[in-house]
Image (cartoon, rainbow, N blue to C red):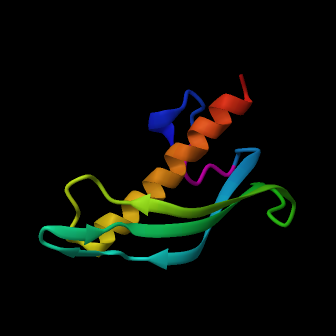
Amino acid sequence: MNKNTDIKTSVNNLSAKYTLIVETVWIYPGWFAGIMNQPSKLSTLLKFVETADPSRVLLEIESKNAPGDNFVGLPNNNDRISEGYAKTAKTLAHMIEKKTR
């Protein structure tokens, strides 16, 4: 997400006021068969919570069917699925940028 927005985030920062929890709801790994492929798809629930009290959910965003692939296809399931998480982060970063202008 840091690559796609001016708002900087950190991992495991216990002094941060808010925390983003990413819950994976559904994963379709897609497939690769040489000249043909199908991208992975990933659905997540993004929860912004207070770090001091994670039971206090401030915002929930549902992300459905984030595609995980590049144009040439990825033969490795892990790479395709990780691209779905990257797409989710990029989309979230753009949404935050748009809403905070």
Tell me residue 2's x, y (percent): 49, 38
Left or right of 7 in this view: 16: right
- Image position of 69 (left or right of 87): left
Q: Is residue 12 magenta?
A: yes
Q: Is residue 44 magenta?
A: no
Query: In the displayed structure, would residue 8 be above or below residue 82?
Result: above
Image coordinates of residue 54 in percent, x first then y, are 79, 63
Magenta highlight range: 9-14
Q: Position of residue 85 (x, y in %)?
A: 47, 59
Left or right: 101 with respect to 83?
right
Q: Is residue 93 left or right of residue 20?
A: left
Q: What residue is drawn where x is 44% and y is 36%?
A: 3
Does the magenta stretch mainly form a helix, a strand or a loop? Answer: loop
Instruction: Check the image and report above or below for 76 versus 20.
Output: below
Q: Nearer the viewer, residue 54 or 43?
A: 43
Q: On screen, 67 above or below 89?
A: below
Measuring 25% from the left and 69% from the top, which residue is drawn there? 37
Residue 29 in the image: state x and y as whole percent. 38, 76
Residue 54 higher or lower than 1, as above or below: below
Residue located at (87% from left, 61% from top): 56
* Placement of the C terminus among the 4 image quadrants: top right
